[in-house]
Image (tube, helix red, strand yellow):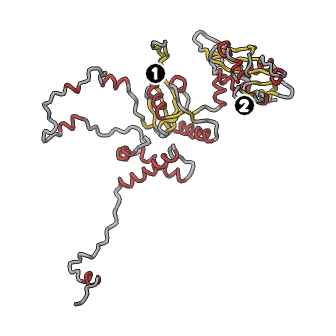
Amino acid sequence: MNKITIDDIFNDDDFELLNPKSKSPSVKSTDDRLMDSFEEINAFVDKNNREPNASSMSEYGLLAKLKAVRQDERKKITLKPYDRHNLLGHIELEDINLDKILDDNDFGLLNSEVDLSIFRLKNVPNSEKRAEADFIAQRKPMKEKDFQLYEAMFQKVHREIKEGKRKIKPFHNIETNLHVGNFYILDGVLLYLESADTITKKRGFKTGNRVHIDGRTKTIFENGTWSNMLYRSLGKQIQKNGKLITNTESYVEYQMLENANLVKEEDLKTGWVYILKSQSTNPEIANIKDLYKIGFSSVPIDERIKNAKNESTYLFAEVKKVKNYCCYNINADKLEQLLHRFFAATCLNIDLFDERGQRINPREWFVVPLDVIEEAIELILNGTIVNYKYDVENKKIENNTI
């Protein structure tokens, strides 16, 4: 008997059952290609935490695709379900509500004679009132010509972050961290708080009255959208999924000097800048002439220094108050930082050891004549400090513009 080989089997295929037909190559639809193109943009934002810009040819191509999509309503509607970075802003999609679902109940599967009173919650606020109170505005796309100025601002902020002129820090408190004119990050997208039509109210609590600020904002996002969401809603979102971006030092100094005006009844006391002299008996400290501590306190000075002998920042010794300046309408903390930078070359460089033998290097003590410190404070308050520098060798302030 002849053995049947594999060739015999294939050759006996009268009906061509074993003849594989080549599959026609799959052809992508227009929508498939559109979604693939948009996913490239999403992937770029995933990696870089920003939209593509015109800084390179590869990014310029993605930027052109994004602009083309934003100008086509049909494409925006198609891609909105895949828009995980809200690049397309608010899109009005078809409203499929409960009434439409119930009207389509051909087989009566949704009919019920059951008493549903057990699901009625008596102690929960009405949903319409809750919706009004919790309203968070949808982001709306901006016209390209209107967004150009903001786009330049966002690009500058990115550069300053990269250069270390700005820092990304946690956002802790709405009242102290959320300010008009500042930049923030929300869900990976840079935003600019341009304005806020806020109202300040006092609310009573058992622990005392607290200031409550709220109102509408104008918030610009770097993806070309804007929103008029509530001030506190914006703050809560940043608190939950965002960060604050610090201002540059030059901007902080400018703001502080701009606000250093005459004290008025409605002005806000922001703290005290003080000058102290050490009463230490340690020869390393006592023998240093013109040694002063320049500091900032948000509480009265006497309260701040009452435990000085037990604190390293006061060199573990009692201190004597020399001068203190009550500050209004300026950031006293920034005033202190300016003084520290101005006199940085004279900072005390000494090692102290606490009772456990740990080394401490205090940084707020400076070897500078008292009259020079007073002169520097005057220059800061009148806004001319930027024109001067401290000459360590001659112990005097000099004009550096001459």
Q: Label 1 crowding class (10 Å Cα cut-off): few <14, some 14-19, many 20+?
A: some
Give how far across and how far down residue 310 sits, in percent: 69, 20
Q: Label 2 crowding class (10 Å Cα cut-off): few <14, some 14-19, many 20+?
A: few
**Discs 2/1, front:** 2
Q: Are marks 2 and 1 in contact (CB under 8 Å)?
A: no
Q: Residue furthest top?
A: 265
Quadrant hosting residue 158: top right
Q: Residue furthest bottom?
A: 1
Amino acid at the residue labelled 1:
Asp
Image point (66%, 30%), residue name:
250
Give how far across and how far down residue 157 sits, in percent: 58, 37
Q: Is residue 303 above or below residue 232?
A: above
Give how far across and how far down residue 312 sits, in percent: 70, 24
Left or right? Give the position of 389 relative to 162.
right
Can you tell which mark lies on residue 359?
Answer: 2
Image point (46%, 28%), residue name:
236
Total labels drawn: 2
Of residues 32 and 286, which is closer to you in this image?
Answer: 286
- Kindly report the distance in space between the C-alpha atoms of the residues bearing marks 2 and 1: 47 Å
Quadrant location of the N terminus in the rendered image: bottom left
Quadrant location of the C terminus in the rendered image: top right
Amino acid at the residue labelled 2:
Arg
Q: Earlier in the sequence, mark 2 or mark 1?
A: 1
Q: Which residue is mark 1?
A: 214
Image point (23%, 77%), residue name:
16
Disc 2 element: strand
Q: Residue furthest front?
A: 356
Give how far across and how far down residue 118 sits, in percent: 21, 26
